Image: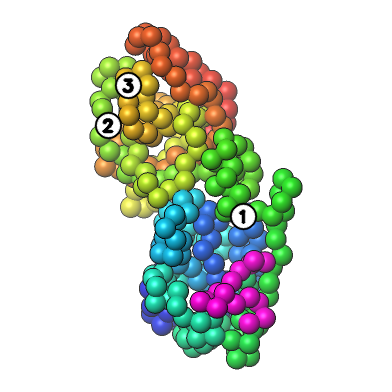
Amino acid sequence: MITAYAPEALRTSLGFLSCAATIGNFDGVHLGHQALLRRTVEAARKRGLPAVAVTFDPHPSAVLSSRPSKGLCTTAQRLEYLEELGLDAALVLPFDRALAAEPAAGFCRRVLAEALRVRELFIGYDFRMGCDQAGAEAIRIGSGGQFSVTQVEAVHQDGGPVSSTRIREALEQDDLALANRLLGRPFAVRGIVVHGQGRGGPLLGIPTANLDVPVSMAMPVPAVYATSARLWTESGAEPWRMSVTSFGSNPTFGGAFLTLETHIMDCSADLYGRELEVRFLAEQRRERRFDGLEALIAQLRADMEQRRTLPV
């Protein structure tokens, strides 16, 4: 996946004269986004053009709202999902107040028509652009006839259109299964393994990887989860491994802050400083305070045995 902050640099690096494109935040790259992205790739392939996604970093709500939306994936995850769906490139535009103040027509001309030379643009059913919040018809006018605009219908799942907002609400309301259905994959977080309190291996005999998750990311409710985990290297991702993850405050030890601790089963590697991704498959139990280490260790081993009953 090739990314660039300057549209001209992206087009030059790929060597294309024009493209088919889509535009959006693509937070989570859920089922609705996937339908939109596949339409873009399909159109690009028919015309022999590269398929380009135009997206933003940070999320516009981080700039425009006093209560920004929690993210469903990092920018790195988003780009990986786009690549898996067949996109040839992504233009990641820094979102700031200057960009927010630009009318749709100006953006269409400057970025889409002149820099990327878009020939077909695909947008979501509720997409709005620019300070004037232009919809499909205004975007067509703003294009100056240089590209066509196709609005893709909503994808419906579990009684309503799929949206990032519904997924965040599902996570907040303890419905991980719904969030995963709307995403079309297990919800996943990714970060760097950091030092914790040193209890897992030395004290409990069950080593855990403490993941540094940005506070701007959405998370499921505090509980113990059946998860899968994989490490990332410079050459890419390693295979998924079975894991059990505790997201909570460690009430047995009187913890005051939420932490994410993952025990990767059948793994003895030194993980500190390495990049780790954890995907949440199902809730196993709520966290609770145990009367002593023996009871806690017994429950942790039961959690591990329960995890083995599920696929990787």
Magenta residue check for 259: no
The answer to whether the residues at label 2 and label 1 have Cβ atoms under 8 Å apart is no
Please provide percent x and percent y for residue 253.
32, 19
Tag on residue 163? 1
Residue at left offset 42%, top offset 32%: 247
Residue range of the region highlighted in magenta in the rendering: 124-138
Q: Is residue 47 visible?
A: no
Tag on residue 254? 3
Q: Residues within 10 Å of mark 2 (few under 14, many from 20)?
A: some
Please provide percent x and percent y for residue 138.
63, 82
Question: Mark 3, mark 2: which one is toward the viewer?
Answer: 3
Q: Is residue 123 above or below residue 59?
A: below
Amino acid tagged 1: Ser
- The residue identified by callout 2 is 196
Amino acid tagged 2: Gly
For the residues marked 2 and 1, what is the alpha-carbon distance in whole angstroms? Answer: 35 Å
